Amino acid sequence: MTVAVGDGYGAPLTASRELSEAAARCGGNGPDSGDGGVRLILGWMPRPDPGLAFGAFADVRTFMPGWGLRQAVNAGQVRFAPARLSAVPALLHGPWRPDLLVATVVRVGGGFAFGSEVSWQRAAIDAGADIAAVVSHAAPRADAGPPLPAGRLTIIGETSEPPGTMPDTMPGPEHQAIAALVAPLITPGARLQVGPSPVANALLRTLAAPVRIDSGLLPDAVVDVAERGVLVGEPVAAYLTGGPRLYAWADGRPLLHPIEYTHDLGRLSADPLFAVNTAVEIDLDGQVNVEGTAASVLGGIGGHADYAAAAARSVGGLSIVAVPTLHRGRPTLVTRLSRPVSTPAHDVDVVVTERGLADLRGRSRPERHRALTDLWGG
């Protein structure tokens, strides 16, 4: 059978060891063992899961490795299949159709719902997966959807451990300078998406214009936006990515939705959308790599391509790539990307560094080359 495991900071880590032992009894022996045994589907893993024994499974695959799967992907224990996040439901209804979803749930009313992430999990259920549920007594109740189907849910355990905490990377002077350049681009009342980065933290903690947050990941800094009185309505997200402060604020709020909703390009582009994302590197055409370096997979495509495309086609919005000119002493502008393109150049409107910004809209390729070269001081 094929087993999918819920992801994010609320992943059901307490069930991983038993899951691995059960898979080993069915015959595993790693990714080259053929079609027998149990297949494992993993999503975004921001932290390692020491209970998962990858060799117990006949095949292990992920669409967005995250920091927790970086070593396993590089070692060949987990196969990374590049896919934009909006395409994951189609994968789960197709070649990755799961028989079972192992997930963390919380009690709501007389039933159960997801807690700190919804993401692609409802797509797995819609594709036919039954639910092996770990009931959390510490996760926030932030699922905006209906209770999970009781007849397809079996409780396999409970936990009092809260969801994990995403490290709060403090912005440096270069990140604050970039945020100061990005902020005036965002029009009051528009929707704002931010990718995880120090620039996003700096932007959310200083933004004065009222905004609606519509993002795949909802970070701690959104609480600052709410406390300053510039948050319009309830945020829309697929994952909570923060710590105790965010989880307490999110508890009882209908914030989290399935990927089919959060990453729907038609919905996102219907109104002005400002997508503020970063890059591992960007080339002279404006093509973006967010998968990793030549030596290592870092994160995966995720929702970068989805939000960039939606923002670029939204009237009044902008697809913004905000990136320092240097990362660990190396230029982030390159003549050739070290990995395949994650987000195409035609979905990048504006590039912002600590030195200024380059508006690439309507420019020819030679003009884009010059604008980016000048921005990096070349």
Image: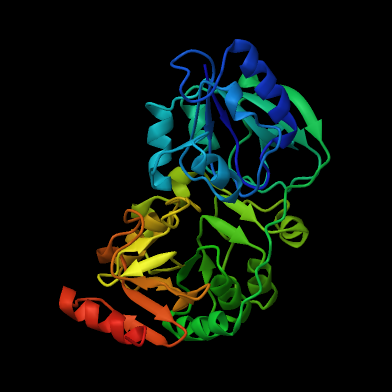
Please identify the residue farthest to the right as the structure is shown. 160
- Viewer-nearest residue: 273 or 82: 82
The answer to whether 345 is drawn above or below residue 216 in the figure is below
Residue drawn at 69 percent across, 35 percent down: 12
Q: Position of residue 152 (x, y in %)?
A: 61, 20
**Res. 364 in view:** no
**Left or right: residue 179 compared with residue 117:** left
**Left or right: residue 331 compared with residue 229:** left
> Where the C terminus falls, by quadrant?
bottom left
Q: Position of residue 48 (x, y in %)?
A: 66, 44
The answer to whether 52 is drawn above or below residue 300 in the figure is above
Query: Quadrant of residue 111 in the image?
Result: top right
**Left or right: residue 248 compared with residue 185:** right
Q: Position of residue 218 (x, y in %)?
A: 59, 59
- Viewer-nearest residue: 211 or 66: 66
The answer to whether 168 is drawn above or below residue 363 in the figure is above
The answer to whether 271 is drawn above or below residue 240 in the figure is below
- Viewer-nearest residue: 360 or 249: 360
Residue drawn at 40 percent across, 59 percent down: 307
Image colouring: rainbow
Q: Position of residue 348 (x, y in %)?
A: 32, 68
Query: Quadrant of residue 42 in the image?
Result: top right
Q: How many marks?
A: 0
Residue drawn at 35 percent across, 53 percent down: 265
**Res. 206 in view:** yes
- Viewer-nearest residue: 334 or 215: 334
